[in-house]
């Protein structure tokens, strides 16, 4: 099993302690087996100089090794979290890539479990939203009145089957203000809708009459607002009274 970062750090300190003990043991050995004071002084000086460079080099390795390991591990985790924060939940995480450190691997496995939970929640939410959308769509489609949902710029977001049958030219992404009709009643009708969108006003049982064609229609509408209260569109209910 791979060692954790903490165990690796402890191992490095134990090795450093071992080097210090070895230095001390060599000095003691030299003291007990010295043949002359001059030789003793030279041997101890040599041991101290050699181990000074050894310990100095080892400390430089430790000083650079620890930040390097941390930067490498955290940079990889940061990249994964950045992708997740951008909405990419389908990341193929190979935990064996991060098996150099047990602690990092545990964190990666925890991230992978979190991604799986997010994916299941996201799929369940998408299914529920689609189901509610289908219910609302089917409910609107069976209404005898014509229904148009338009954005604040006048683009048609949705219209039910009743409206499509009455006005085949209407479809999603068509702008109400750009529709042109030969019939004066239809032109007047959509001019009223366009004015209501531009003015941000709601219509309440507004009667629309055309003396030439003798056609009538009642128009109801309400504004769609976001959570901040800003108008983002309108819903129109149109009941055309045939001659």
Image: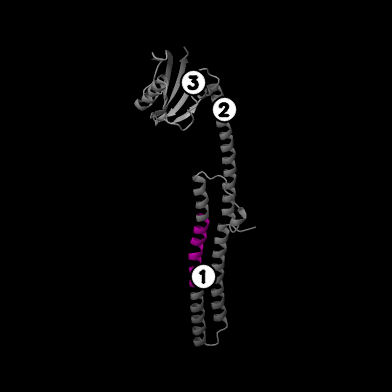
The quadrant in which the N terminus is found is: bottom right
Foreground: 240 or 231? 240
> What secondary structure is found at the residue carrying circle 3?
strand
Side of 101 where 169 appears, left or right: left
Q: Position of residue 63 (x, y in %)?
A: 48, 65
Q: What residue is pinned by disc 2?
A: 134
- Percent x, y for residue 7? 58, 59
Q: Residue 159: x percent and y percent?
A: 49, 26
- Which residue lies under the disc numbered 3? 146
Q: Residues within 10 Å of mark 2 (few under 14, many from 20)?
A: few
Residue beneath the point at 51% across and 74% down: 54
Label 1: element kind = helix
- Taking the spot 55% from the left edge, 31% from the top edge, the residue there is 129
Q: Secondary structure at mark 2?
A: helix
Q: Which residues are magenta?
A: 56-74
| Residue 188 appears left or right of 10 | left
């Amino acid at each position: 099993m791979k060692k954790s970062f903490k165990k690796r750090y402890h191992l490095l300190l134990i090795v450093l302690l071992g080097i210090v003990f070895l230095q001390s043991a060599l000095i003691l050995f030299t003291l007990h087996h010295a043949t002359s004071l001059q030789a003793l002084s030279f041997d101890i000086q040599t041991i101290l100089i050699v181990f000074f460079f050894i310990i100095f080099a080892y400390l430089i390795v430790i000083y650079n090794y620890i930040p390097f390991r941390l930067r490498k591990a955290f940079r990889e985790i940061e990249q994964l979290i950045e992708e997740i924060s951008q909405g990419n939940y389908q990341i193929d995480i190979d935990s064996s890539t991060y098996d150099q450190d047990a602690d990092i691997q545990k964190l990666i496995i925890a991230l992978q479990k979190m991604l799986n939970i997010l994916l299941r929640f996201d799929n369940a939410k998408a299914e529920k939203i689609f189901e509610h959308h289908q219910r609302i769509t089917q409910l609107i489609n069976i209404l005898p009145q014509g229904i148009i949902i338009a954005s604040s710029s006048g683009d048609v977001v949705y219209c039910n089957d009743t409206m499509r049958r009455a006005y085949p030219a209407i479809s999603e992404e068509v702008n109400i203000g750009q529709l042109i009709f030969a019939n004066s009643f239809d032109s007047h009708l959509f001019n009223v809708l366009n004015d209501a969108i531009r003015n941000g006003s709601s219509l309440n049982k507004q009667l629309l009459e055309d003396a030439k064609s003798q056609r009538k229609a009642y128009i109801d509408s309400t504004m769609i607002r976001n959570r901040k209260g800003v108008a983002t569109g309108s819903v129109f209910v149109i009941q055309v009274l045939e001659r």
